[in-house]
């Protein structure tokens, strides 16, 4: 079991703001689903908007063992974020 440790005012400081999630978040969230479900629930309670970028989505989905695993991961990332922001191709080309 993994315990997520928060600073004292973590949720209140982020209330009504956006929190950008990276690939590590999604990898850990799939491994420790109950702990991260509580985190996402707290974020919703404090109106924290969870977002990521399309490059994180691509990295998280990359190397999926099967179509079923890919679809499961895709559903997970879509269900746990409010938005997946596009990155213009000029940024990474």
Image: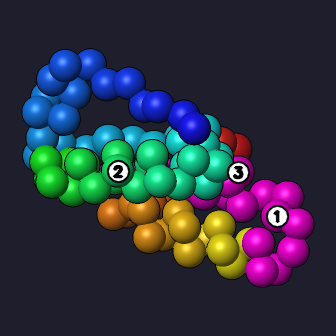
Residue 91 seen in this snapshot: no
Q: Which residue is mark 3?
A: 59
The residue positioned farthest toward the top in the image shown: 7
Q: Which residue is mark 1?
A: 64
| Residue drawn where x is 24% and y is 49% of the image | 43
Q: Secondary structure at mark 3?
A: helix
Q: Is residue 24 above or below residue 80?
A: above
> Looking at the rendering, in which quadrant would you find the C terminus?
top right
Q: Secondary structure at mark 2?
A: helix
Whole-percent x, y for residue 30 in the image? 61, 54
Q: Which residue is mark 2?
A: 38
- Residue 70 lies in what quarter of the image? bottom right
Horizontal side, residue 91 vs residue 14: left or right: right
Horizontal side, residue 55 vs residue 7: left or right: right
- Residue 71 lies in what quarter of the image? bottom right
Q: Earlier in the sequence, mark 1 or mark 3?
A: 3
The residue positioned farthest toward the front in the image shown: 1
Q: Nearer the viewer, residue 27 or 17?
A: 27
Q: Nearer the viewer, residue 21 or 5?
A: 5
- 32 is within the stretch colored magenta: no
Crowd around label 2: few <14 · some 14–19 · many ≥20 (10 Å)? few
Q: Are marks 1 and 3 in contact (CB under 8 Å)?
A: no
Crowd around label 1: few <14 · some 14–19 · many ≥20 (10 Å)? few
Q: Which residues are magenta?
A: 49-69
Q: Earlier in the sequence, mark 3 or mark 2?
A: 2
Mark 2–mark 1 Cα distance, whole angstroms, equals 26 Å
| Residue drawn where x is 57% and y is 47% of the image | 32
Q: Secondary structure at mark 1?
A: loop
């Amino acid at each position: 079991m993994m315990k997520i440790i928060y600073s004292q005012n973590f949720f209140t400081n982020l209330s009504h703001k956006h929190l950008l999630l990276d690939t590590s978040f999604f990898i850990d969230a799939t491994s420790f689903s109950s702990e991260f479900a509580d985190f996402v629930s707290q974020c919703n309670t404090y109106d924290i908007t969870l977002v990521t970028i399309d490059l994180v989505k691509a990295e998280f989905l990359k190397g999926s063992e099967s179509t079923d695993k890919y679809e499961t991961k895709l559903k997970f990332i879509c269900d746990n974020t409010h938005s997946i922001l596009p990155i213009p191709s000029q940024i990474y080309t």
